[in-house]
Image (cartoon, rainbow, N blue to C red):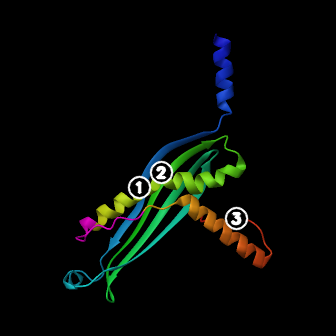
Amino acid sequence: MSEENTEVASENSNAPSFQIQRVYLKDISLEQPNAPQVFLVQGEPNVQIQIDIQFGQLQDGVYEVIVLGNITTRVEDKVLFLIEAQQAGIFELKNIPAEQLEPMLAIACPNVLYPYLRANIADLIGRGGFQPIHLAEINFHQLYEQRLNEVATASNADQTSGIILPN
């Protein structure tokens, strides 16, 4: 029976593994450059949202993934607030085939991090004295495919090859 356990353990050591080591708020800032006068301005706010992804290897099989969010909200020509946030995580990806590693880092990991980013941004906006803005869900798979298509189009035009994603 101990031989069976040893065989199972050796088989599992080569099995693909995806583990979340840590999720953390790496950076967040709120600026209200026109406070307190901006609280008296009436009108419908114009919200601009930018989301990006960065990832990098920390050590063998361990990666940091960061979902960045930038929000700028204006009424008329006055800035209500600016938010820059970085929600990060450390992920262990072992025995993942090379062709699946980048999609894991660009799709699966951001799917884990994004709900934390949304909650932190909504909380910060509320603490800043504004009605919270709840960021819409993002289909990171579709975003990844879109970036691959953009790169393919650009590489066809430039006659270069390779996949370019945020660092």
Q: Of the residues under marks 1 and 3, which one precedes in the sequence?
A: 1
- Res 34 → quadrant: bottom left
Q: Amino acid at mark 2?
A: Val
Q: Rate crowding at label 1 as few (under 14), some (14 to 19) or many (20 or more) other CA atoms within 10 Å.
A: some
Residue 115: assigned label: 1
Residue 163: assigned label: 3
Mark 2–mark 1 CB contact (< 8 Å): yes
Q: Rate crowding at label 2 as few (under 14), some (14 to 19) or many (20 or more) other CA atoms within 10 Å.
A: some
Give the quadrant of the C terminus: bottom right
Residue 48: assigned label: none
| Residue at the bottom extreme of this rendering | 77
In the image, the segment drawn in magenta is: 126-136
Give the quadrant of the N terminus: top right
| Residue at the top extreme of this rendering | 1
Q: Rate crowding at label 3 as few (under 14), some (14 to 19) or many (20 or more) other CA atoms within 10 Å.
A: few
Q: Secondary structure at mark 2?
A: helix
Residue 112: assigned label: 2
Cα separation, mark 1 vs mark 3, equals 27 Å
x, y percent for residue 64:
54, 53
Task: Please give left or right for residue 144 compared with residue 51 in the image.
Answer: right
x, y percent for residue 9:
64, 24
